[in-house]
Amino acid sequence: MAGNDVLLSIKDLHVTVEGIEVVKGVSLEMKKGEKHAIMGPNGSGKSSMANALSGHPAYEITSGEVLLDGENLLEMDASERSIAGLFLAFQYPLAVPGVTVTNFLRSAIKAHRGDDPSVLRSFRKEMKEAFKLLEMDEVFASRYVNDGFSGGEKKRFEILQLAMLQPKVAILDETDSGLDIDALKVVSKGVNAAHTDDNAVLLVTHYQRILNYVSPDHVHVMMNGNLVRSGGPELAHQLEEKGYDWIKAELVA
């Protein structure tokens, strides 16, 4: 059983997509208050692992163990994983025409906290504060979810959900992709505000630039479906300077 301060424990995780193994024995442990980053080239399995952990039906976990705050994540469906405290910010957030942002957020909050009147009374205030944090105009509250949103607006809305839902473990799948520097700073501010001593954040990214604003405690390199190197923030700077070829060369040496 994972220790009391361990929020996410992954042991020997294997994942297949359409019969092809894309995650090949990943083990990772995240404790309360920690920020981890997984970096790696395209096709290394980073997003596949994130989607599998969230319960995406296209990603089959064939073996391994995943505990979320001591509970068996693999026995839960996707909605149960969310309610248990796992959050995934999507690399490509989908539009939901016909569902307003306000109704979407209210339903999510009710699913996570119940429909006690006090929860619903505080909802509007929390939503207003989250819009302010992510520097989004409150007119978005009446718009349909991600419908007609720019790429940057979609990413801000993902982090707005993070701020409101307050999960135990947040997995951010390439949240920095497609963002200009101003949007990146706002999104990073939202991530830092949502991170506390009682939760954990896992950033999945190609590039070091978001790590200039969301400083990780641990950096891992993923290649060919496995974590091949781990270190501190200095590892991200090495990757930014030297790319991934030097690690590939060491692996085959």
Image (cartoon, grey):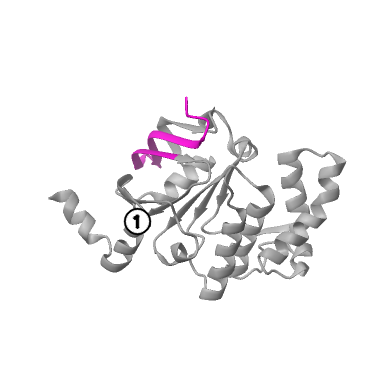
Residue 120 spot, x, y in % from top left: 83, 47
| Residue 27 shown in magenta | yes
Q: Is residue 134 visible?
A: yes
Seen at 61% across and 40% down, the residue is 85
Q: Nearer the viewer, residue 150 or 112?
A: 112
Q: Left or right: where does residue 203 sit relative to residue 19?
A: right
Residue farthest toward the front in the current orientation of the protein: 197
- Residue 75 covered by magenta stretch: no
Residue 151 % position (x, y): 57, 68
Quadrant of the rendered image containing residue 116: top right
State whether residue 99 is above or below residue 81: below
Residue 136: name its quadrant.
Answer: bottom right
Q: Residue most toward the top?
A: 1
Asked if one can make out residue 56 in the rendered structure from this viewpoint, the answer is no
- Left or right of 100 on screen, residue 5: left
Please tell me how crowded label 1 is: few (under 14), some (14-19), or many (20+) other residues with Cα within 10 Å: many
Q: Residue at x 68, y 64 (%)?
A: 133
Magenta stretch, residue numbers: 1-29
Q: Is residue 35 above or below residue 65?
A: below
Residue bearing the label numbered 1: 40
Q: Is residue 174 above or below residue 231?
A: below
The percent position of residue 235, horizontal first and vertical second, equals 32, 57
Q: Number of marks in the image?
A: 1
Q: Main secondary structure of the magenta part?
A: strand
Q: Residue at x 53, y 32 (%)?
A: 73
Task: Indicate the secondary structure of the residue bearing disc 1.
Answer: loop
Seen in the image, is 7 located left or right of residue 109?
A: left
- Expressed as whole percent of the image width and height from the top left, the position of residue 181 reads 51, 74
Amino acid carrying mark 1 in the image: Gly
